[in-house]
Amino acid sequence: MSSKQKVFALGVVLLSVTLLASCGIHGVGRVQTSGNAPGSSVSPNVVVPSANSISGRVGGDGPVLAVKIDDTFQAQPQIGIDKADLVYIEQVEAGLTRLLCIFSSEFPSQVGPIRSARISDIDLLAQYGHVAFAYSGAQSKMLPVIRSANLQDLGAEHESSQIYPRDSARTGPVDMLLEAQTLMTKLSEQNVPIAVSKNMGWSFGDAPSAGNPVSAVSMFWPSNTYYASWSSTESRWLLTERGLPDMSADGKQLGPTTLVVQMVSITPSIYHDKFGGVTPFSVTIGEGTGYILRDGFMFAAHWSRPTAADGTTWTLADGSQVLFAPGQIWIALTDTAPIFTLPTVSASPAPTK
């Protein structure tokens, strides 16, 4: 069996597990049948849920599907992105933002609205391996770049309307959806080798002790603003966009367990849209600074990604790794410093006489 066949065979098994999980079957994992490890409190024969290497979510590792999603007001509510393991916020033309969603532990039935690819996607996806890439087109000059990249080109021009249907309740250009489960099943049946999720440079565990408590953060792009507030009851950062709660199509407010603000250089690229708007390029290979937000705390950190094939590591000033909280991750790629809101301190009651 060739190496590609081995990768695909593993992907088929994991895809089957993932699709079962997305249909409501949870808790898939390994069964510990031997004695406990020293210091372990887990009893023999207890099912230990598998965790996804990208997000730490229950669901295990599966084939990686990357999807481009519109992020304008007209596109909301967006469909399926609450099931993503990781969501990138990227700057595009006119200072607007677009999302790149990474799915692996679970594939929703539908995702959308689907929009076109951008040059920043190529570098971002290189660290995941040969992923399935779903999008609705690209500038003609960029199409050869996508075709030559280490990814499975699954643009809408290559697929039928059964994979990319139109939503009659929406208007163009924000009416195209992706039948994600149908697409991944098709790839499995056609023996298409898709990379399986792996460690991306970060790990999961307890928060460091050196964090600063914050109740919220504002993140900026020239024509968009995100605001995230910490919810202690839901243990995640609830997102607001353009002053309105960022809601999914199923009525749940979007928000990650770990929120990353990655400071990057954003420069004009050689690509531009039909209206003359220049496509910005976000530099995600190299090193820089940023902020990790989890559990109501902010950690100033340093990011490093030496080559395109490397994952991104995050460390504190002393060189120790910043552990992420298991759950969905959002990474905001911006060149504008965020503004943090400190928790409100309740005044102490006056002493009684």
Image: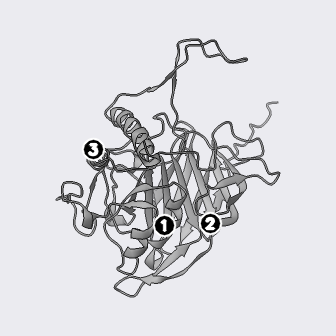
| Relative to 210, 110 lies left or right | left
Image quadrant in which the C terminus is located: top right
Q: Amino acid at mark 2?
A: Ile
Mark whose residue sits in front, 1 or 3: 3
Contact, mark 2 vs mark 1 (Cβ under 8 Å): no
Contact, mark 1 vs mark 3 (Cβ under 8 Å): no
From the image, tell me which residue sits under label 1: 122
Q: Earlier in the sequence, mark 1 or mark 3?
A: 1
How many residues crowd around disc 2 within 10 Å: few (fewer than 14), some, or many (20 or more)? many
SS for callout 2: loop
Q: Is residue 158 above or below residue 236?
A: below
Q: Is residue 237 above or below residue 334?
A: above
Identify the mark at residue 189; answer none if there is no mark: 3
From the image, tell me which residue sits under label 2: 285
How far apart, in angstroms, are the residues tagged by discs 1 and 3? Answer: 26 Å
Q: Amino acid at mark 1?
A: Ile
The picture places residue 141, in percent across and down from the top left corner, at 39, 81
| Res. 239 visible in picture | yes
Q: Earlier in the sequence, mark 2 or mark 1?
A: 1
Image quadrant in which the N terminus is located: top left
The picture places residue 247, in percent across and down from the top left corner, at 38, 51
Q: Earlier in the sequence, mark 2 or mark 3?
A: 3
Q: Residue at x 55, y 39 (%)?
A: 56
